[in-house]
Image (spheres, helix red, strand yellow):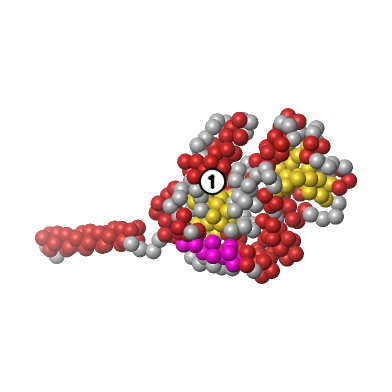
């Protein structure tokens, strides 16, 4: 084969490669703009409305990640490993103080009976004020952290009046059962699991804290997966309403997901499962008051603007 022939064949081969490469790049562009979107990555806890959605398989196509508590879930938002998830009222504030980026896209009605201070009947404690000088366990940065703050204020006490032991739920239960702590501030379903003879509710959040559920979403997900977020919230709202209308069936479906007995599931859900609600300026004010309270007590390093995290673009889902 002559030199000119070899040159022509080489040029033809290079041309084919360039055409193929252009086709691959065009294909990548189609996937990014008009192709199938990546699945919505959902973080959930073993309790709350998202658990029911998962248990009933009402959100096909999403991926699920389980977290023990709200603070752990917000760390996943920080790491970029989930797009959306649910927490109580305090985790968003601690997350914002930690410079984690997120939007608050939905909430729930108040759930004050869903968190409580538990003590032993044998302790003789009759009011929260009786815990002065005692050891109180709770999960740091969770919804019950705000309840503790409110209880201290209501009883003219400060954090200096008690010894706080920060324990995750899996650590708090054995510490409470064995008497290593005098009281345990906890939320459902751990609350319901701990209710048994010899244990009493010293106080719950009634009149003190709203204990709402909050749905948090990564800013990128709100912008680039808005339709998927809206679809999830719509399905979540529908499934939550179904559960409220069918409490016995809800408990039957959720008990295996929660890994708790059906009667315990029903007791906790009957008091703690509430309708979802849109976020509003009033919700922003409510969260801001909590954030300001935490800043005043130096539980977060500096004041934050949590109201700015409220995103009302999905309000129509709940109206």
Name the residue at 73% across, 47% down: 204
Q: Nearer the viewer, residue 16 or 317?
A: 317
- Is residue 114 among what the camera can see? yes
Q: Is residue 238 magenta?
A: yes
Name the residue at 65% across, 52% down: 111
Q: How many marks are shown on the rendered structure? A: 1
- Is residue 85 among what the camera can see? no
Q: Residues within 10 Å of mark 1 (few under 14, many from 20)?
A: some
Name the residue at 73% across, 29% down: 160
Locate residue 24, reporting x and y percent. 29, 61
Q: Which residues are magenta?
A: 231-243
Locate residue 172, reporting x and y percent. 74, 46
Q: Is residue 252 magenta?
A: no
Instruction: Report helix, strand or loop for mark 1.
Output: helix
- In the depicted structure, whether residue 62 falls above or below residue 138: below
Q: Which residue is mark 1?
A: 283
Residue 132: name its quadrant.
top right
Left or right? Give the position of 287 relative to 125.
left
Q: Nearer the viewer, residue 283 or 82?
A: 283
């Amino acid at each position: 084969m002559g030199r000119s022939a070899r040159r022509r064949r080489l040029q033809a081969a290079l041309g084919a490669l360039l055409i193929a490469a252009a086709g691959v790049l065009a294909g990548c562009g189609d996937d990014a703009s008009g192709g199938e979107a990546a699945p919505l990555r959902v973080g959930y806890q073993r309790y709350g409305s998202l658990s029911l959605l998962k248990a009933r398989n009402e959100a096909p196509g999403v991926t699920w990640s389980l977290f023990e508590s709200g603070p752990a879930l917000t760390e996943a938002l920080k790491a970029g490993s989930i797009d959306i998830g649910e927490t109580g009222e305090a985790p968003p504030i601690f997350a914002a103080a930690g410079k984690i980026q997120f939007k608050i896209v939905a909430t729930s009605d108040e759930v004050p009976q869903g968190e409580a201070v538990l003590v032993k009947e044998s302790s003789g404690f009759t009011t929260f004020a009786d815990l002065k000088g005692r050891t109180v366990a709770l999960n740091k940065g969770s919804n019950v952290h705000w309840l503790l703050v409110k209880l201290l204020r209501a009883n003219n006490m400060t954090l200096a009046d008690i010894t706080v032991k920060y324990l995750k739920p899996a650590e708090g239960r054995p510490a409470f059962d064995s008497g290593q702590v005098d009281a345990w501030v906890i939320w459902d379903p751990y609350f319901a699991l701990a209710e048994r003879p010899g244990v009493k509710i010293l106080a719950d959040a009634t009149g003190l804290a709203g204990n709402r559920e909050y749905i948090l979403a990564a800013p990128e997900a709100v912008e680039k997966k808005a339709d998927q977020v809206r679809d999830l919230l719509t399905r979540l709202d529908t499934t939550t309403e179904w559960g409220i209308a069918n409490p016995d069936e809800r408990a039957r479906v959720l008990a295996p997901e929660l890994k708790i007995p059906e009667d315990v599931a029903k007791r906790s859900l009957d008091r703690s499962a509430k309708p979802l609600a849109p976020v509003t300026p009033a919700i922003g004010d409510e969260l801001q008051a909590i954030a300001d309270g935490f800043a005043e007590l130096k539980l977060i390093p500096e004041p934050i603007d949590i109201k700015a995290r409220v995103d009302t673009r999905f309000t129509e889902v709940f109206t």
